[in-house]
Amino acid sequence: MPPSPQGDERTSRTPLLEIVIPAFNEEERLPGGLLQLCAKLARMPFPTAVIVVDNNSTDFTAEIVSAWPQGAVPVRLIHCATPGKGAAVRAGLLATKASLVGFCDADMATGLDALDAAVGLLIAGEQVVIGSRAHACSDVENRHSTARELGAVGFRALARMIVRGVSDTQCGFKFFDGALVRQAVAGLRTPGFAFDVELLARCVGLGAAVLEIPVQWRDVPGSRFSLARHGVGILLELGSIWIRLRAESRAGAEPAWDPLLNPIGYP
C-alpha cells in the first residue's frame, strides 16, 4: 500500500524530533517497541524520525529494521562496530540533524506518555530533559533482585560525585537540544553502561541544566545487565570518567578524540 498523503508530507520535511534506539540482538523486543514508538510519533504535530543503531547483532535485528514499512515516521538503520550501548547511542546521536533529539530503549520500558512532557519542555527552552525513576511522582514496577538494588544504590552515590543533583542517571529515556547534545557526545569516551553519566556531565559542562521528569516505568524481561558480570567494569568506567573529566577541566582543553568510538565516520 502506498504511503498516505500525510505520510508523504511529513517525510518530505526535515524532522523536528529524532529518536535513537540502540539495539543489540533485539529481534524479539524491537518490533513491538518500534510499533509503539512510531504510533506515538505519528500523532505528533510535526515531522519526526527514528534511527535504530545495530550494535553488532547476530540475530535478525538489522533485517527487521531494513524491512520496516516507511510511513509517516521514517525509520533508518545505521551500524556501529564498536561494542557497547554507549558507543551505539553516540553513533546514533551523531547521525541526527534535528533540533530536538533523544534516545530510548528498544523495550520501551519507559511509558511514552512522558514524551509529550519532554518535548514540550525542550520547546519551552530546556536543554536536557531525562526520565527519572527516582522522581516522587514516578510509577515504577521493579522486579530486580536485592543484590542488584544495593548495587544501584552504590552506583547512584558514585554517579552523583560526577553529575551533582541528578538522582537517576540511568533511565533509558533522555532528550536534548540537538546542537547541544551533538557537541557533548562528540567527546564521549565511555562505550559501556555508564555512558549516561559522562554524557550528562558533558552537557552540564557546556552550561546546560538537567531536568528530571516523572515516568511510568516497567521492568521488561530481557535485560542483559548482570551485576556479577558488569559490576566491576562499571566501577572502572565511573573511575575513568571522573579522572578524564577532571583532567580535561584542569587542562581547559577540548576533550580528546577516540577514533575507536567513531565507527561510522562522523567528525
Image (cartoon, helix red, strand yellow):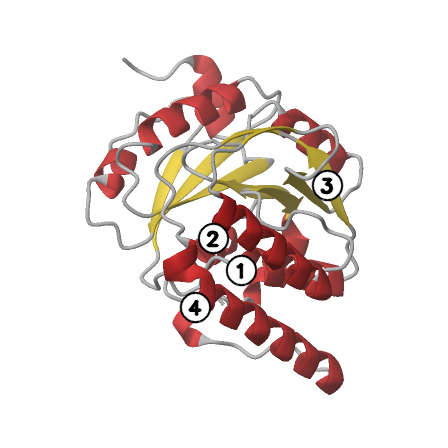
Pointer 4 with pointer 3, Cβ within 8 A: no
Q: Quadrant of the N terminus?
A: top left
Q: Nearer the viewer, mark 1 or mark 4?
A: 1
* Residue hosting label 2: 89
How far across and how far down the image is residue 154, in percent?
A: 61, 58
* Residue hosting label 1: 195
Determine if residue 72 is in view.
Answer: no
The numbered dot on residue 261 is 4
Spatial separation of the CA atoms under disc 4 and disc 2:
11 Å
* Residue hosting label 3: 212
- The amino acid sitting under disc 1 is Phe
Q: Residues within 10 Å of mark 4 (few under 14, many from 20)?
A: many
Pointer 1 with pointer 2, Cβ within 8 A: yes
Quarter of the image for residue 33 reads top left
Q: Residues within 10 Å of mark 2 (few under 14, many from 20)?
A: many
How far across and how far down the image is residue 110, in percent?
A: 54, 31
Q: Is residue 247 above or below residue 266?
A: below
Q: Is residue 215 above or below residue 54?
A: above
